[in-house]
Amino acid sequence: MSLHPVPAIRERVEEAKAAVLAQVGLLEASFGRAETRWKSDGTRVTAVDLAISADIVARLSRRFPEDQFFSEELTEAAEPIPVTSRCAWVLDPIDGTNNYAMGIASCAISLALLEDGWPVYGVIYDFSRRTLIHGGPGVGVFDGDQSVRVRTDPLGPQSLIGFHAPSDKRFTGHVVDVAAQAKLRALGSSTLHLAYVAVGILDGTVDHNVKVWDIAAAVPLVETGGGCVMYLNGPVFPLRAFDLRMGRIFYVAGSPAVAARLRDILAARVIPATGE
């Protein structure tokens, strides 16, 4: 994994930021009234998700035809798609589609650049704050124009922790476990939970329900900003194959101390292997 922004990466970063910002007008125009349907996995998709996915992939593939492009809105393949190119992109055109469709602004465009399977740069458009969050190793993390870092306060009663209710009801007790130690926030966007750790809005986050496209762009932001992402049911990166049917990822994140404390709070309950 590169620890510096080599020219090939810098060039891609600039194109990625432009491609994401080019979608803002469409997001604004269709907010709360986009045509929607439900996919076979029970998740919502709107016509805007599909349009953003197609446009970003088209823009970047014209500029970097040797790269691979993976989106939550790809047509499902019979088998996982191997990651074979040096540079690959992982896109969630709207993370928080339920919010977006219902007129709730907590949602984001999430675009990750991977090098040899490792996330090295993230570009996230935070629709709720109309702000571009981006960063990666050797560059830093930026919330708009402001350089930011992960908060370093210890976990305590005033800490804010992103937390979505577990889809696996074996883990509903984790709500009580974490709420006994900190204040919980559920924004409806896993991307924003993790990105807000990176920019210092949240102290940490816990999520049982995510897929790789939900977090790939925010992982390098957290790690570059001095934080830690701990995967509790198996490693995620380097990404060797893209699979729309992958199992759910269970992780905690925050400063190294906060992430370790969250991990320890959850450790009393059994954690299933990836894919269960």
Image (cartoon, grey):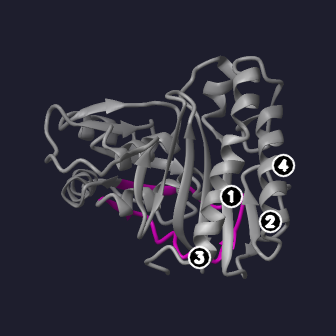
Q: Which residue is mark 1?
A: 15
Q: CA distance from mark 3 to mark 1?
A: 12 Å
Q: In what element is the residue under mark 4?
A: helix
Q: In what element is the residue under mark 2?
A: helix
Q: In what element is the residue under mark 1?
A: helix
Identified by mark 2, the residue type is Arg
Q: Which residue is mark 4?
A: 54
Which circle's residue, 3 or 1, is located before the other in the chain?
A: 3
Between 248 and 159, the one nearer to me in the picture: 159
Residue drawn at point x = 37 percent, y = 50 percent: 198
Residue drawn at point x = 47 percent, y = 72 percent: 235
Q: Which residue is mark 2?
A: 63
Which circle's residue, 3 or 2, is located before the other in the chain?
A: 3
Which circle's residue, 4 or 2, is located before the other in the chain?
A: 4
Q: CA distance from mark 1 to mark 4?
A: 15 Å
Q: CA distance from mark 4 to mark 3?
A: 26 Å
Q: CA distance from mark 4 to mark 2?
A: 14 Å
**Label annotation for residue 7:** 3
Image spot of residue 183 (x, y percent): 25, 31
In the image, the segment drawn in magenta is: 227-252
Q: CA distance from mark 2 to mark 1?
A: 8 Å
Which circle's residue, 1 or 4, is located before the other in the chain?
A: 1
Which circle's residue, 4 or 3, is located before the other in the chain?
A: 3
Identified by mark 3, the residue type is Pro
Q: Main secondary structure of the magenta part?
A: loop
- Tell me the quadrant of the picture where the C terminus can be found: bottom right
